[in-house]
Image (tube, grey):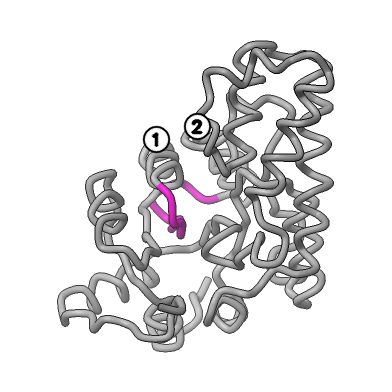
Amino acid sequence: MTPDATRSELTLDDTLRLRKLIGDARCVLFDFDGPICRLFAGHPSAGIAQRIKHWLAEQGHAVLLKGLKDTSRDPQDLLKVVGKAHPGSELVMELERKLTEEEEHATVSARPTPYADPLIRTLVAIERKLAVTTNNSATAAARYLGLRDLTSCFGPHIYGRTADPALLKPDPYCLERALDSLGYPPHESLMIGDTLADARAARRASAPFLGYAHDELRADDLYAEGASLVVDSLEYVLEAARAETPHRH
């Protein structure tokens, strides 16, 4: 099924909960790949992972891959494995640079998540401050937002992967950086994400979490990690945002 081609109906309680989440939030922290776009729609992550594996093997580090499943399709898994084995090394930094280049290339063929663009613009219109908090490269996220003419909606508040893989979500580092920069306490924020790492990072940062998932099992897992609500379409969030009035200071 094409994501967002259909949507389940929210109960009245869930609709009210969603309205409250939007109403209470002074700032919204978006994960990037998932809630904003399908970054690897035209440049699959499985291919990236395979190219990185070949590069590591060529560099004489094939032994690092033995602890990783051959079927791994997530290049960030490779980055974490190498980062744990060689923390702070030039190898880790070079691998992170290669992954950033791949992600920047992927932005050209990335597909916007249904309703994400109007949701972002509506949140700005109702005076919510926005940030990106992602395990992807900040430069890749910035490039994609520029292609969608959304740069002004986020300004400088794009917090992505650093040279230290240990700070990837579920570590709350990027969320805490965003909150510090925006100037809001966690309870006045809302994180929107689609992974267990997102939910765990939000919980560790004490930020309310809104999950985005099409799979019921994933939704159950997000609830188990502390999600206040999980939706299978951002259209619900857009409707809740459109029902809001701007904050008055």
- Do residues under tags 1 and 2 come within 8 Å of each other at their CB atoms? yes
Residue 53 place in picture, x, y as percent: 71, 31
Q: In the figure, is residue 223 to the left or right of 67? A: left
Q: CA distance from mark 1 to mark 2?
A: 8 Å
The amino acid sitting under disc 1 is Arg
In the picture of the structure, the residue carrying the numbered disc 2 is 171
Mark 2 lies on a secondary structure that is: loop
- The correct choice, above or below, for 205 with respect to 209 in the image is above
- Mark drawn on residue 204: 1
Q: Which residues are magenta?
A: 184-195
Whole-percent x, y for residue 48 in the image: 71, 45
Numbered mark located on residue 133 in the image: none
- Say which quarter of the image contains residue 77: top right
Which is nearer the eye, 134 or 27?
134
Within 10 Å of disc 1 (Cα), the crowding (few <14, some 14-19, many 20+) is some
Sequence-earlier tag: 1 or 2: 2
Write down the quadrant of residue 111 in the picture: bottom right
Residue 60 position (above or below residue 115)? above
- The amino acid type found where label 2 is placed reads Asp
Q: Residue at x 65, y 50 (%)?
A: 45
Which is more foreground, mark 1 or mark 2? 2
Q: Residue at x 58, y 84 (%)?
A: 118
* Direction from residue 43 to residue 210 in the image, left or right: left
Q: Secondary structure at mark 1?
A: helix
Q: State which quarter of the image contains the N terminus.
A: bottom left
Q: Nearer the viewer, residue 102 or 34?
A: 102
Q: Residue at x 24, y 70 (%)?
A: 17
Is 193 one of the magenta-colored residues? yes
Image coords of residue 143 (percent x, y): 81, 62
